[in-house]
Amino acid sequence: MPVLSLGVVLCLLRPLERQRFESEERATLPRGLGGNGLLGILGGMRAAVAGGLWLRTNQAWEKQDAAETMALLNLTVATDDRPLYFWLNGARMLAYDIPTWTVRPGEPEAIRRKAVRSGVAAADAFLESALRVHPRSPEILIEMANIQLRAGENPELAARLFRRAAEQPGAPYFAARIHGELLRELGRTEEALAWLKKILPDLPADDPAAARTLIEQRIKSLEAVRKEK
């Protein structure tokens, strides 16, 4: 019976998969699919249905079908918004993969840049939705920062996002470390020095992930730069 029920639900959802969305827009679900609609009756089957939809998302991704991939991504997280896996990997599809599908070889660089900007904006909107569900997640903020740094080429915004990530409970040490490094690369020596001095006392010496020795070296380096000015 559970298998049969799952098949019925997926059949009911299938027409929604064919919706098309412009690459600049964030896909949204039709009214009535919220907690009181079709998805609201899934109950304990949410994870199973979302897993099936994620497989369909990957099939659309393999076909490089941008519209179907985006539609299925949004349908997946609407079915089960709890797993960070869906949000993080979905954002990577939007930021890094889909933009490359829409640009043909030989097209002007301006076209490529426009596609990349569109992908970054779509990924950012997608992850903003994730933050509404997981408001204290350092993983989501780190993903947003990485996308802005790698695809968006916006180190200023990336630095702010890495700081936000570092300030969340359970954040990995590297988020704070990268924030300081980006401040240094942006030429904001005093801010970088103040930040590294602030985080240093909370870095355990016996945990390699904390990289306390590296932070101490960075502080000495920045202090030397300040003396030279």
Image (cartoon, grey):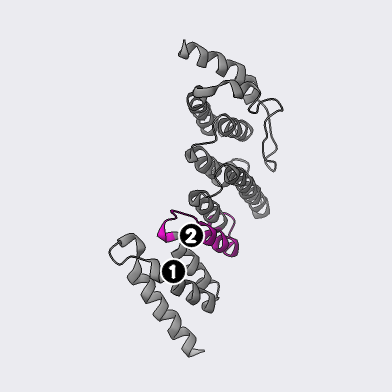
Quadrant position of residue 159: bottom right
Q: Is 165 contained in the magenta span?
A: yes
For mark 1, give the secondary structure: helix
Residue 42 is inside the magenta segment: no
Compared with 186, 2 (above or below) is: above
Around disc 2, counting alpha carbons within 10 Å, would you say few (fewer than 14), some (14 to 19), or many (20 or more)? many
Q: Farthest residue to the bottom: give it.
A: 228
Rendered view: 47 above or below 174: above
Which amino acid is tagged 1? Ile
Q: Is residue 110 left or right of residue 199?
A: right
User: Can you tell which mark lies on residue 199?
Assistant: 1
Front-most of residues 26 and 166: 166
Task: Estimate how packed mark 1 is, as few (under 14), some (14 to 19) or many (20 or more) residues with alpha carbons within 10 Å.
Answer: some
Q: Position of residue 34 (x, y in %)?
A: 65, 28
Mark 1 touching mark 2, by CB under 8 A?
yes
Q: Residue at x 44, y 69 (%)?
A: 199
Q: Quadrant of residue 63?
A: top right
Q: Which mark is residue 166?
A: 2
> Looking at this rendering, what residue extends furthest in the left direction?
206
Magenta stretch: dominant secondary structure: helix
**Where is residue 181 shown, x and y percent of the image?**
47, 69
C-alpha separation, residue under disc 1 versus residue under disc 2: 10 Å
Does residue 168 appear to the left or right of 12 in the view shown?
A: left
Q: Nearer the viewer, residue 186 or 4?
A: 4
Highlighted magenta segment, given as a residue range: 149-174
Q: Position of residue 223 (x, y in %)?
A: 44, 83
Mark before the other along the chain sequence, 1 or 2 = 2
Looking at the picture, how far across and down is residue 151, in whole percent?
Answer: 56, 54
Residue at x-position 56% and y-position 31% = 76
Q: Secondary structure at mark 2?
A: helix
User: Three-letter amino acid code at disc 2?
Assistant: Ala
Please say if 106 is above or below 207: above
